[in-house]
Image (cartoon, rainbow, N blue to C red):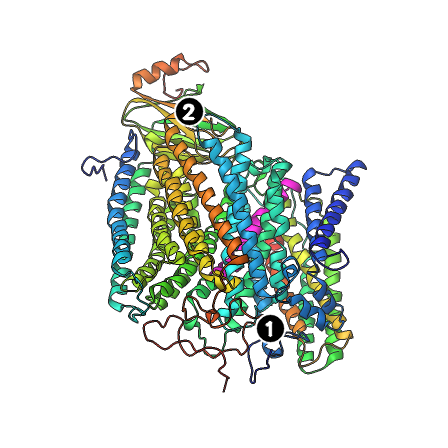
């Protein structure tokens, strides 16, 4: 699929993952398609409001009940648009889900009202650190109520459901620090339930991991 | 009105006694050492209060007489129908559909204003970054705002305008089951009151969606909401049965289904949805109540329950529910356009088909509310298809409206202004719906202010604009007086501008990452949020113009003629307001309802059946 | 208020006066349509409960879960026979009154009431001796919620049939006027069919 930049337009504020690139392209496409639809109706309405104003004329308008041809065109065009959008969306979704395999898995645990991340080496931390350019697998669970794990810059969001782990696969493309948020109302601490994601090169990531307190960590590899 | 006769005073007494007995019995049991939960006390108290209320208002007396095999008291039955001019009939168990319609309409508007007040409180919190009222208070206020507004959207048009007008529009003397109709209305005051006082019971912080496990944890206010919703659901189902039997069995001679006004069609599809879907959410809420109050584990993962199951059951109803809310508005809009464009409704048969298609499809899209819920991946694809497909019949509504307007003779009276406003607002709502239907874009947008803006544009744009169009349009028919056209225009423009100023920026807020259901946000968004709060306050103020216009015009407005809009549907062929029996003679219909432009007109009443 | 010559669809049902324009036949048929629609709504309610049962059951490791036993089939089996027979007696009553045989109808209704009441008693006995309660995890939750809702519907049906018996005693039922008997029979058969589903899915399969 790849990224489609129309005249350099980007709609999402931050695009820092492969998935977000696909999604931003979808945003741009939908917006490009919406504009003519909006114009058609708005211009039609505005024109009608002026041109067909009664202005004291008490006569009825012409007894037109419909127009087979116009109705048919309308139906065909709207149906074609819908099917086209569906195909594009379905392909986009498959692309976003992508390869369901990765060598870096983190357990994400939500609870009222904080996030915990457990790394392959057993380290448990409050920040999510992931390698840039590599496919990452997040397994999301909740200890209590439904939360939702959302990192806007990566275009990933998935509910944290008690009793049922959910999966996210993501490939971050730009190193940096990004905010994350809980995106499902979870009680009186929902507003402040934030998290931080740090995307860095593997070496930096390994160094950070070995600095973390917890089980002996020899980097981000799972214990032999 | 003493308490010896059935009436509102006796109803309130009955509610108080029932509630006291229910609470008393269980509190007594608790004191005697039995394990009784607070929720069980609230539950029994509410149930008995509701029964006491209905007994007091006299809802059951005819059925009790019937059940006991006693002869029908004809005087009593006639009296229950109410006498014209007697204002007290609005506060009694009155079986005249026109009275019930006004009861629904006035109650709905009062609830709308109350819900709007809660909305204003939300905007007070959100006007600036930081916490003003606090997160707990905000969550309850937000949830209550939602619960009340949804109730308004569900009942205002079909219960208010529908009840008053549908029998007349199809040439009948009343609904099929007038007593059940009155029962449907009187089932509402207590649950509405319960939702209004839920903050006193500890509030509820889950939003109207009530997802467990949060809703299992939440305070008693949660239970109040759940019980109230189930009660409103029962009222809704009874209403739906009434509408369907009335429309299918009681049309005047000559009124074939394809000669029915489009408004009646929209309510017929609405009633079908309400009949079929409501029990599912009643089941879901009952299971949730049982989890809270009786120790079951439907939605407790640790004991084998499934949390996502609730979401499926909830949305299986709640998606059709948005069409239960929207279709009556769409019907009202399409009913008004031909009259003020002086032209037949464009593509009427296609519009009817589209309403039916929307109804059918509405049962197949529910999981688009669950794209990020963790549900099975394969399910996203068919749901995305059906959701996108539903925009085709919905688009036909625009075809019908625009096709009627095009080449018409447009009279911009207040009802027509709301039609134009609807076309803009519902279009924005519809287009933004595509962003939410498309899973790649929905991943970012779900649970943000984009969604909030989308559903306000569709529900306010569809239901509320339709409600206003219909209320202004039918005001002379219902009250016998004309509203002030100048105040109507002022209300429209103020509301329209304020509404757009409030909700349009929210699309941007959502894309920028502001979540919904939060009491605070990043400070960079403070400016926009302050603007939104200011604009929202204007919505509220504009409603003062509406209320003033309605009240003053009803009391002292200019007398209205039978047919001030020169419309062709049956309700305009009788006096304003209609006589108690609706028609002196049931008319015979020989043409469709929109024969403007020199086509055959609907004959006035007085033609006898050969 | 003028009386209109010729038949006009109206609201009235058994003995209820409208506005001088009466079409009792239409009124009765409206009532029966209303009852059928109401039953449709109830079907959806049980649909939701069954859906919950199937989903929960398919997600649990084994069924019944560890340490729980399904109830024995003897009593529910007997109950199935009772309810099916009660539908037969109910239908017999409807046929009878259609032919104007009032006494036969009354016996049919009484038999239905008796069979239905025994059903309730046996269910109560079974519940008391099941060994698990509503709060026994999802097994108890689904079992008792489904059977409980069904039982409540049976009780409502028995109440309705008793009312019909009362009205018959007051001479208000005849070959021409027996909408309430038909309505009760629709409801009762619905309750029976729900039980058949319940029996197969909760007890047998």
- Provide the chain ID for the residue under circle 2: A
Q: Main secondary structure of the magenta part?
A: helix
Q: Which residue lies under the disc numbered 2?
A: A195
**Residue under label 1:** C11
Report in which chain the residue with disc 1 lies.
C
Q: Nearer the viewer, residue C107 or B592?
A: B592
Above or below: residue B201 compared with residue C104: above
Marks 1 and 2, how far apart in space? 64 Å
Same chain for mark 1 and mark 2? The answer is no
Q: In the image, which residues are magenta?
A: B270-297
Quick one: label 1, few (<14), some, or many (20+) residues within 10 Å?
A: many
Residue B286 among magenta residues: yes
Q: Say which residue appears at 54% left-offset and 63% top-offset.
A: B163
The residue nearer to you, when weighing B394 against B16, is B16
In-image side of A123 versus A75 (left or right): right
Residue B35: quadrant of the picture: top right
Residue B285 in the image: state x and y as whole percent.
Answer: 58, 47
Residue B567 occupies quadrant: bottom left
Q: Residues within 10 Å of mark 2 (few under 14, many from 20)?
A: some
């Amino acid at each position: 699929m790849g990224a489609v930049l129309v005249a350099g337009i980007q709609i999402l504020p931050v695009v820092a993952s492969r998935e977000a690139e696909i999604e931003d392209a979808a945003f741009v496409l939908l917006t490009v398609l919406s504009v003519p639809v909006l114009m058609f109706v708005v211009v039609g309405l505005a024109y009608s409001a002026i041109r067909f104003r009664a202005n004291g004329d008490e006569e009825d308008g012409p007894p037109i009940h419909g127009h087979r041809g116009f109705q048919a065109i309308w139906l065909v065009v709207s149906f074609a648009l819908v099917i086209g959008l569906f195909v594009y969306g379905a392909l986009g979704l498959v692309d976003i889900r992508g390869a369901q395999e990765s060598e870096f898995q983190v357990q994400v645990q939500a609870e009222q009202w904080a996030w915990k991340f457990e790394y392959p080496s057993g380290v448990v931390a409050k920040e999510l650190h992931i390698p840039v350019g590599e496919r990452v697998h997040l397994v999301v669970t909740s200890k209590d109520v439904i939360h939702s794990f959302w990192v806007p810059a990566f275009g990933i969001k998935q509910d944290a459901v008690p009793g049922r782990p959910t999966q996210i696969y993501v490939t971050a493309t730009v190193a940096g620090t990004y905010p994350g948020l809980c995106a499902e109302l979870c009680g009186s601490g929902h507003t402040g339930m934030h998290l931080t994601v740090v995307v860095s090169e593997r070496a930096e990531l390994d160094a950070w991991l070995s600095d973390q307190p917890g089980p002996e960590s020899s980097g981000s590899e799972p214990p032999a | 009105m003493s308490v010896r006769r059935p009436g509102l005073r006796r109803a309130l007494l009955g509610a108080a006694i029932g509630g006291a007995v229910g609470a008393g019995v269980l509190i007594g049991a608790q004191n005697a050492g039995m394990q009784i939960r607070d929720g069980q006390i609230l539950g029994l108290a509410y149930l008995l209060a509701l029964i006491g209320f209905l007994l007091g208002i006299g809802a059951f007396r005819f059925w009790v007489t019937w059940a006991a095999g006693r002869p029908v008291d004809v005087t009593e039955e006639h009296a229950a129908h109410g006498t014209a001019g007697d204002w007290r009939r609005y506060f009694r168990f009155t079986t005249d559909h026109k009275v019930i319609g006004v009861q629904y309409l006035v109650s709905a508007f009062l609830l709308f204003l109350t819900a709007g007040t809660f909305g204003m409180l939300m905007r007070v919190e959100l006007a600036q970054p930081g916490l003003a009222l606090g997160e707990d208070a905000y969550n309850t206020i937000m949830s209550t705002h939602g619960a009340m507004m949804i109730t308004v959207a569900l009942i205002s048009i079909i219960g208010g305008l529908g009840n008053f007008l549908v029998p007349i529009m199809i040439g009948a003397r009343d609904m099929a089951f007038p007593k059940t109709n009155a029962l449907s209305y009187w089932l509402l005051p207590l649950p509405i009151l319960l939702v209004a006082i839920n903050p006193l019971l500890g509030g509820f912080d889950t939003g109207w969606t009530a997802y467990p496990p949060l809703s299992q944890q939440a305070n008693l206010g949660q239970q109040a909401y759940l019980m109230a919703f189930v009660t409103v659901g029962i009222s809704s189902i009874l209403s739906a049965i009434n509408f369907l039997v009335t429309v299918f069995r009681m049309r005047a001679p000559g009124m074939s289904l394809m000669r029915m006004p489009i408004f009646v069609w929209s309510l017929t599809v609405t009633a079908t949805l309400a009949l079929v879907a409501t029990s599912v959410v009643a089941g879901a809420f009952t299971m949730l109540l049982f989890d809270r109050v009786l120790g079951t584990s439907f939605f407790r993962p640790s004991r084998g329950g499934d949390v996502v199951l609730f979401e499926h059951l909830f949305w299986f109803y709640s998606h059709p529910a948005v069409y239960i809310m929207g279709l009556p508005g769409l019907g009202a809009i399409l009913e008004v356009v031909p009259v003020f464009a002086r032209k037949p409704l464009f593509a009427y048969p296609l519009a009817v088909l589209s309403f039916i298609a929307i109804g059918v499809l509405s049962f197949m899209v529910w999981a688009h509310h669950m794209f990020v819920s963790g549900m099975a991946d394969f399910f996203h694809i068919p749901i995305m298809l059906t959701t996108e497909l539903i925009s085709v019949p919905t688009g036909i509504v625009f075809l019908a409206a625009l096709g009627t307007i095009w080449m018409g003779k447009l009279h911009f009276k207040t009802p027509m202004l709301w039609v134009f406003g609807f076309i803009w607002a519902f279009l924005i709502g519809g287009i933004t719906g595509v962003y939410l239907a498309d899973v790649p874009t929905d991943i970012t947008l779900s649970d943000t202010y984009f969604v909030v803006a989308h559903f306000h544009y569709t529900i306010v744009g569809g239901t509320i604009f339709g409600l206003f169009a219909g209320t202004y349009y039918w005001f002379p028919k219902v009250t016998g007086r004309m509203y002030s056209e100048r105040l109507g225009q002022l209300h429209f423009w103020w509301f329209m501008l304020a509404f757009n100023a409030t909700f349009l920026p929210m699309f941007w807020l959502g894309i920028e990452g502001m979540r919904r259901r939060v009491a605070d946000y990043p400070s960079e968004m403070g400016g926009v949020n302050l603007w939104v709060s200011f604009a929202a306050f204007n919505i509220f103020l504009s409603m003062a113009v509406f209320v003033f216009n309605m009240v003053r015009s009803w009391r002292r407005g200019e007398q209205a003629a039978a047919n001030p809009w020169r419309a062709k549907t049956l309700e305009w062929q009788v006096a304003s307001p209609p006589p108690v029996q609706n028609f002196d003679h049931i008319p015979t219909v020989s043409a469709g309802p929109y024969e403007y432009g020199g086509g055959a007109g609907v004959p006035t009443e007085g033609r006898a059946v050969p | 208020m003028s009386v209109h010559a010729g038949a006009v669809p109206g609201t009235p049902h058994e003995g209820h006066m409208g506005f001088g324009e009466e079409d009792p036949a239409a009124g009765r048929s409206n009532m029966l349509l209303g009852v059928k629609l109401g039953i449709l709504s109830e079907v959806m309610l049980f649909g939701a409960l069954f859906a919950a049962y199937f989903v929960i059951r398919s997600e649990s490791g084994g069924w019944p879960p560890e340490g729980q036993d399904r109830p024995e089939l003897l009593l529910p089996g007997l109950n199935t026979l009772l309810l099916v027979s009660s539908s037969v007696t109910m239908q017999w009553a409807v046929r009878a009154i259609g032919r104007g045989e009032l006494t036969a109808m009354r016996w049919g209704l009484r038999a239905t009431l008796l069979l239905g009441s025994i059903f309730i008693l046996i269910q109560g006995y079974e519940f008391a001796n099941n060994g698990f309660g509503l709060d026994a995890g999802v097994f108890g939750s689904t079992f008792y919620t489904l059977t409980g809702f069904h039982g409540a519907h049976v009780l409502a049906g028995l109440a309705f049939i008793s009312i019909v018996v009362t009205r018959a005693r007051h001479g208000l039922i005849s070959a021409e006027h027996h909408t309430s008997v038909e309505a009760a029979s629709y409801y009762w058969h619905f309750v029976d069919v729900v039980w058949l589903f319940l029996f197969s899915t909760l007890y047998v399969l």
